[in-house]
Amino acid sequence: MDELEGIDVSSLEPESEWDVFGKAGLVSLVGSGPSKNGYEFFITVDSIPELNGVHVVFGEVIQGMDVVYRINNATIHEMEPIDPVIITKSGLL
């Protein structure tokens, strides 16, 4: 199996004043700071205009928002889901 190359996100800039966070299903990145090389992605489940100009949208869920909502509604304790959340058969990117 070939290795997948990582995405170089160092050159991505936050979106401008456009209403890019105006709906559910947008995929975005949040970094842990300059030169930290730590990133996590998140998927919006609602309109979040406060994020406009702060984060970069780089994708959109085109199928399976019901799964996103189920993950979002998982019961958590101390910032961890009580039951494991495991994504399988996600397809090829």
Image (cartoon, rainbow, N blue to C red):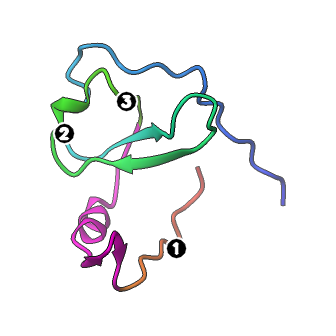
Which of the 4 quarters of the picture holds residue 92? bottom right
Q: Position of residue 22 (x, y in %)?
A: 17, 33
Q: Which residue is mark 1?
A: 88
Task: State how far apart marks 2 and 1 are (Cα).
Answer: 25 Å
> Identity of the amino acid at label 2?
Lys
Q: Is residue 64 above or below residue 78?
A: above
Q: Nearer the viewer, mark 3 or mark 2?
A: 3
Q: Position of residue 10 (x, y in %)?
A: 61, 25
Q: Looking at the image, do the residues carrying marks 3 and 1 touch, with CB atoms under 8 Å apart? A: no
Label 2 residue SS = loop
Q: Position of residue 89 (x, y in %)?
A: 53, 71
Q: Nearer the viewer, mark 3 or mark 1?
A: 3
Q: Is residue 8 above or below residue 62?
A: above
Q: Which residue is mark 3?
A: 55
Boundaries of the magenta span: 59-82
Q: Residue at x 50, y 40 (%)?
A: 32
> Identity of the amino acid at label 3?
His
